[in-house]
């Protein structure tokens, strides 16, 4: 049994940011990582993926992107290198290849059991990631056995897929990127679209994330939104990071020949049924985008940015997608694989403490759980909208470290 003041579970950006702040605060700790540092960026992302956020937005406590291409988007090996350098920059006490099997309450301390021994500490920080387990809808089980099914964390490139058509379900960042890539490989792609957030990559000459950053959208906290639960369930942004800064949205995909359909509802063997809601979702996404663009223009005018940025660009709504079928027969259409890009959920089978809600999510207020000394970091909109991003987790780590330090003083 080894003892320390804080055990951090997970060696991604959230665990490392926490470790940097604990180091800064002189708090003895260990980071337990079942794989290697930045494991999910190494082994759960597809080959062509680049960051969606521009490189300058890779900012962690005491560390930031300083490479030659601040406006570009890092490839996965570069992100891994970035996080490895971060860990080395403060000699993060990471124990790699160490899987946490149980976190239990002991006498005034937590007992953390791993496959390589146990730890005891008065505080524990869970940093096992918001994008933990891919969500696969129930209908997946109803599809015929000879249809290949994949989730984005297992997808690498189109060569993995059998010849024939592909159904991609989900049109947020992962879904639109995979639909585009698979279509470009010469396979007919059908994309099932639900609620989504359409965005241009660049507006008025600036990256759309630059605008959101400048306007303080990413800094919005739970107090700034009317319904934090709804905000936490928002779909990811429909964006791709490419050297040419291209936009990737539904009009573009449809123009290239990707067939769009509504939300996948149910399946009966080879037949898959879709909601008749494609138009409703695209209209709603356009309305949200139109409001955002108007907000950007007002912001530019109010802050005197007009002179620095390009003139307003006309907004082009997705006028009318082609009529979408509400039923397709996979066999008749030669569709041999389905990719479920339907988001992520989180699993904590090792967490033996009464802090999970009915959905299995950790109950918390800004990362502070009801169990004294137990924290969670890295979840979407944990303390503010950017909490799960490379650019946002740092501030949360600083604030949670301050809370944790107070807990340690009290516990002592
Ligand atoms: C496809 C995709 C693209 C993204 N692009 C961007 C982007 O461009 N910009 C941006 O800012 N954000 C992006 N994100 C969001 C976010 O930055 C990533 O999800 C990032 O990986 C989150 O870091 P994290 O440290 O919170 O969690 P993770 O990176 O998921 O790290 C959690 C770590 O915990 C470890 N772990 C889990 N369970 C255990 C256990 N029981 N014991 C020990 N270790 C355990 C895992 O191995 C993992 O290394 C993207 C996410 C996805 C899915």
Image (cartoon, grey):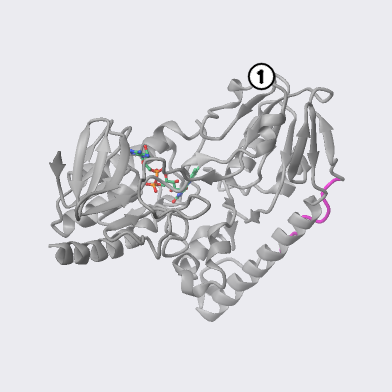
Task: Give the residue furthest to the bottom.
Answer: 302
Q: Position of residue 279 (x, y in %)?
A: 80, 54
Local secondary structure at mark 1: loop
Residue nearest the observer in this picture, 348 or 227: 348
Q: Would residue 200 be found to the left or right of residue 103 on screen? A: right
Provide the residue designation for mark 1: 162
Residue ID at (67%, 49%): 249
Q: Which residues are magenta?
A: 315-322
Q: Position of residue 135 (x, y in %)?
A: 57, 41
Q: Quadrant of the C terminus?
A: bottom left
Q: Dividing the picture into quarters, in which one does residue 35 lie? A: top left
Q: Is residue 111 above or below residue 319?
A: above
Residue ID at (16%, 60%): 25
Q: Is residue 65 visible?
A: no
Residue ID at (51%, 37%): 49
Q: Quadrant of the N terminus?
A: top left
Task: Give the residue furthest to the front.
Answer: 107
Q: Dividing the picture into quarters, in which one does residue 151 lie? A: top right
Q: Dividing the picture into quarters, in which one does residue 286 lie? A: bottom right
């Amino acid at each position: 049994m080894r003892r320390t003041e804080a055990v951090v579970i997970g060696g991604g950006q959230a665990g490392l940011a926490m470790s940097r702040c604990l180091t800064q605060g002189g708090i003895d700790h260990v980071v337990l990582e079942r794989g290697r540092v930045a494991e999910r960026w190494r082994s759960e992302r597809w080959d062509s993926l680049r960051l969606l956020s521009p490189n300058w937005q890779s900012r962690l406590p005491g560390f930031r992107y300083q490479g030659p291409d601040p406006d570009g988007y890092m490839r996965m090996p570069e992100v891994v290198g970035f996080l490895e350098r971060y860990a080395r920059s403060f000699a993060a006490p990471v124990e790699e290849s160490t899987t946490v099997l149980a976190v239990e309450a002991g006498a005034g301390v937590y007992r953390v059991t791993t496959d390589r021994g146990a730890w005891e500490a008065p505080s524990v920080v869970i940093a096992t990631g918001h994008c933990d387990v891919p969500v696969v809808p129930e209908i997946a089980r109803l599809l015929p056995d000879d249809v290949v099914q994949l989730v984005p964390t297992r997808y690498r490139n189109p060569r993995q897929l059998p010849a024939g058509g592909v159904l991609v379900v989900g049109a947020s960042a992962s879904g639109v990127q995979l639909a585009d890539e698979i279509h470009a490989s010469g396979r007919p792609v059908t994309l099932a679209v639900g609620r989504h957030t359409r965005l241009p990559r660049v507006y008025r000459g600036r990256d759309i994330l630059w605008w959101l950053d400048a306007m303080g959208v990413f800094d919005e906290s739970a107090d700034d939104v009317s319904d934090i639960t709804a905000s936490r369930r928002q779909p990811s942004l429909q964006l791709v990071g490419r050297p040419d800064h291209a936009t990737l949205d539904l009009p573009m995909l449809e123009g290239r020949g990707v067939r769009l359909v509504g939300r996948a509802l149910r399946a009966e063997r080879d037949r898959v049924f879709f909601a008749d809601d494609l138009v409703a979702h695209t209209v709603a996404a356009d309305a949200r985008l139109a409001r955002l663009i108007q907000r950007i223009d007002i912001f530019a005018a109010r802050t005197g940015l007009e002179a620095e940025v390009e003139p307003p660009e006309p907004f082009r709504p997705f006028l009318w997608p082609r009529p979408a079928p509400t039923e397709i027969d996979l066999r008749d259409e030669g569709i041999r694989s389905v990719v479920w890009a339907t988001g992520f959920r989180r699993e904590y089978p090792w967490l033996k403490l009464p802090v999970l809600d009915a959905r299995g999510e950790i109950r918390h207020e800004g990362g502070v759980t009801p169990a004294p000394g137990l924290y969670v970091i890295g979840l979407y909109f944990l303390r503010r909208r950017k909490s799960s991003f490379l650019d946002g987790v740092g501030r949360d780590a600083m604030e949670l470290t301050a809370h944790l330090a107070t807990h340690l003083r009290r516990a002592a």
